[in-house]
């Protein structure tokens, strides 16, 4: 019986992960000392012994990521639309965007701590600052690449600018926006972990930082695995929402 494409992908992915864990177990059982890298069993023991604490760290980091990503996505998308509709605003904003875009948000962490303290506000705003630029630039470029014939045809039929943006431009740029949102989601976790490294009392970054101070490598790997799993879950969620909204769009079979 031939598997469907989703079933085949799931089977291959499961096989790849199983193989990776097998190699991990083999190396830690024969060559690598536990201090340098823990065995899969010791990592599993961390989850078994501290399920409530691990869940709490996951919830805290996920909350910061979702809040920052949401604020950054809305800010970037709305500003890109505003710049596309207002040429004067675009000309004034472009130099500022190009000046700020290459600056890594991690370089701003000391200032966010000074301005907002060690609470959640600074961490959420740092994530928003990093993700908003991705959405802004991607959305602006997607709008620029909308085929002019679509807009001209709508204008010929008497459509207003607001109607054109709502019914022509927005549907055309949604695929690019969702792709940018997936990239921004991954970066959100990197920014959240880095911010928690610098100052936090909870979260996966805090967990990893505390474990690194006492060389508890099993907790470090457990934290890394949780980051990957939560990030993967968020990516699947974004893809699922995008798949529903983009059901009309042609999909590649490759």
Image (cartoon, helix red, strand yellow):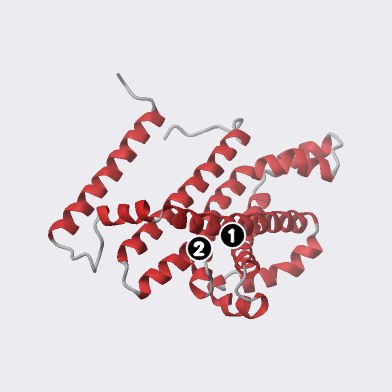
Give above or below for 17 relative to 249: below
Q: Do the residues labelled 1 and 2 touch (CB within 8 Å)?
A: yes
Q: Which residue is drawn at 73% across and 68% down?
A: 93
Which label's residue is closer to the chain start, 1 or 2? 1
Pick whichever, 68 or 88, lies toward us: 68
Q: Mark 2 points at which residue?
A: 203
Mark 1–mark 2 Cα distance, whole angstroms, equals 9 Å
Pick whichever, 224 or 179, lies toward us: 224
Quarter of the image where one finds residue 152: top right
Q: Nearer the viewer, mark 1 or mark 2?
A: 2
Give above or below for 29 relative to 160: below
The secondary element bearing badge 1 is classed as helix
Give above or below for 27 relative to 103: above
The secondary element bearing badge 2 is classed as loop
Disc ID at residue 19? none
- In the image, taking residue 151 as reference, residue 51 lies left or right, namely left
Q: Where is residue 167 in the image (x, y as percent from the top left)?
A: 75, 38
Q: Residue at x 62, y 75 (%)?
A: 112
Quarter of the image where one finds residue 49: bottom left
Q: Where is residue 1 in the image (x, y as percent from the top left)?
A: 30, 18
Q: Mark 1 points at which residue?
A: 64
- In the image, taking residue 175 as reference, residue 206 lies left or right, namely left
Mark 1, Cα crowd under 10 Å, few <14 / some 14-19 / many 20+, is many
């Amino acid at each position: 019986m031939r598997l469907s494409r989703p079933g085949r992908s799931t089977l291959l992915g499961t096989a790849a992960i199983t193989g990776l864990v097998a190699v991990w177990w083999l190396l830690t059982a024969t060559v690598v000392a536990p201090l340098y890298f823990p065995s899969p069993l010791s990592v599993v023991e961390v989850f078994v012994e501290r399920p409530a604490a691990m869940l709490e760290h996951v919830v805290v980091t996920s909350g910061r990521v979702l809040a920052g990503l949401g604020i950054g996505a809305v800010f970037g998308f709305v500003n890109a639309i505003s710049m596309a509709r207002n040429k004067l605003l675009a000309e004034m904003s472009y130099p500022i965007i190009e000046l700020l875009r290459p600056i890594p948000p991690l370089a701003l962490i000391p200032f966010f701590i000074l301005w907002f303290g060690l609470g959640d506000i600074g961490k959420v705003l740092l994530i928003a600052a990093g993700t908003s630029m991705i959405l802004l630039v991607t959305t602006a470029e997607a709008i620029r690449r909308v085929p002019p014939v679509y807009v001209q045809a709508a204008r010929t039929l008497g459509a207003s600018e607001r109607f054109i943006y709502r019914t022509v431009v927005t549907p055309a740029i949604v695929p690019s926006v969702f792709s940018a949102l997936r990239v921004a989601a991954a970066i959100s976790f990197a920014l959240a972990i880095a911010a928690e490294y610098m100052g936090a009392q909870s979260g996966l970054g805090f967990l990893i930082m505390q474990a690194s101070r006492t060389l508890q490598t099993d907790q470090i790997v457990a934290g890394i695995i949780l980051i990957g799993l939560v990030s993967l879950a968020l990516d699947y969620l974004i893809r699922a929402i995008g798949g529903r909204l983009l059901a009309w769009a042609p999909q590649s079979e490759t």
